[in-house]
Image (cartoon, coloured by chain):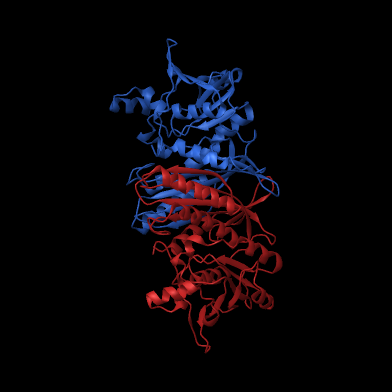
Chain colours: A blue, B red
Amino acid sequence: MSEHRLIEYIRALASGSAYPWLKVGIGDDAAFLDLPAGGQAVLTTDMTIEGTHFEAGTAAALVGRKAVARAVSDLAAVAARPLCSLAAVDFGSWPDARPCEELVRAIHDAAAELSAPLIGGDVASGTGPLCVTVTAMGTPGPAGFVSRSGARAGDAVCVTGRLGGSGRGRHLTFRPRIEEALALAERFELHAMIDVSDGLSTDALHVAEASGVGISLLEEDVPLAEDAVALGEQTGREPLWHALNDGEDYELLFCLPGDQAGELAREGVQGTPVSIVGRVTAERASFLVNGAGRRRPLKAEGWEHLS
Amino acid sequence: MSEHRLIEYIRALASGSAYPWLKVGIGDDAAFLDLPAGGQAVLTTDMTIEGTHFEAGTAAALVGRKAVARAVSDLAAVAARPLCSLAAVDFGSWPDARPCEELVRAIHDAAAELSAPLIGGDVASGTGPLCVTVTAMGTPGPAGFVSRSGARAGDAVCVTGRLGGSGRGRHLTFRPRIEEALALAERFELHAMIDVSDGLSTDALHVAEASGVGISLLEEDVPLAEDAVALGEQTGREPLWHALNDGEDYELLFCLPGDQAGELAREGVQGTPVSIVGRVTAERASFLVNGAGRRRPLKAEGWEHLS
């Protein structure tokens, strides 16, 4: 059973009940709700598992930072402002006290650095791989909650930064695009946003499906990371393949009116480059378009758990 | 390294920073905070791990329910009202789609039943044991947040229900004492509260330590569950030992002015019996007192991870 199908199963279960206080529930990067006595909250939870999200032997400091940054990136994806976080750490078969302390220190420090200070948690030992679950809470940014489901035909599709080859190290050291997301939300009319965790191809399809539209990506305009080129030399694949499918870039993929995208692509945001990589179409099919204008179906070849 | 020492390590790290919006942080059953634009939230996160919190082969429906109920019990422990929950499920090496679906359905159904409907989550497969992390969010109840740190000399120490032998099955089927906690908070002056997850001995010591007081428990007044007697027949231990140390009762342990406890013990709360099991003392040492008045030090022999 695929992760995607399982999430659809959960969404279908949850869709049976309506809660007036719940603005956005299962199926987006984060949930969005009204609190009974006033105020609004954005919540997301993310696992970081040894052997899946990092190799055994990775320094505790990097593991802790990645665990927090993944959750905070989901707040960026909906243009929320981080407030705090909680961490549940199953140390698995990690035997010694010192790396356990290093790991919790890394989680604590990363949470403070990423503006989501640690306010609670749980610890346990087990028999399997290490698993860190971080729940991050935020509040809506200047444009409120930006879902993945609001893309409109005619929108430009943009990404921050450069994509591909994150497995060479960036997947451990990336900086969640919180400041960029908040600045984008303040200055532009964001119709939809997501963070590129599964891969540009898969995440573009997530936006297209949630929005009931199609997305055509222009191969030549996908910004390739140096890592994508270097990794391609090792794997024999095109750097573009890695940029489309590796995932764990944790860049922002977003849709906004086409006439707002040009200025943004020239100037970038908060010092981070922005590229226009495609176009939203009313036709509910998504494509990769090459320099000669030939198109082929966009496939979800990005990372998927439970596949 | 013990769980207790690791949590102390994290608390010490976190105590270096003060956040004006954070009312209660690491070290209590849940965190308590003000939101920037108004409103307050109570947050807790809890893991439920195969081989640690349930045996391999336990029905998915029971696993899912326990995972949610453990987190909701932490909201009860601070007299908060549940609002919603998120679940991160590492299916580990569970191979088949059907139990995965059953598990997420159980989590969804339990969350709805326990007034903390599921609004988000994460799923992954791995190689180790199944691990479900539930984050529950609530709002302060009628008396605000009831911490574990407010016990005062002279208070009566009370518990709901009966204790011991939960491993015979109650640890999977317990009902978190949310209604009881809210009714207690409304009708009585609760000085401190905790849920009995680690065991009466350990959790009483948690309250004593956090409050800077001592607690003397009266052996003869500890309410023994039938399971404590039945388990004692198997293990050869006194039922009292099981009531003190088994843990996973998920009853409420609370302290209130001595003159309010008599009525409560006679009437119970929301149909659940309440027992006076001890007294809070100014002397910062905790004891078990037998029927003849002889006392011995109260030791934390309850459940502890990472020991």
Depth order, front residue of B24/B61: B61
* Residue B99 horizontal/vertical position (percent): 42, 47
Q: Is residue A92 left or right of residue B11?
A: left
Query: Which residue reaches farthest bottom?
Result: B292
A191 versus A179 height, above or below? above
Depth order, front residue of B279/A283: A283
Q: Is residue B257 visible?
A: no
* Residue A304 horizontal/vertical position (percent): 41, 35
A152 versus A146 height, above or below? above
Query: Which residue reaches farthest top?
Result: A292
For the C terminus of chain B, the image quarter is bottom left
Depth order, front residue of A79/B8: A79
* Residue B232 horizontal/vertical position (percent): 42, 76
For the N terminus of chain B, the image quarter is bottom left
The picture quadrant where one finds residue B211 is bottom right
* Residue A285 horizontal/vertical position (percent): 49, 20
The residue drawn where x is 46% and y is 51% is B132
Depth order, front residue of B45/B173: B173
Q: Is residue B212 visible?
A: yes
A125 versus A227 height, above or below? below
The residue drawn where x is 53% and y is 57% is B69
Q: Number of labelled discs?
A: 0
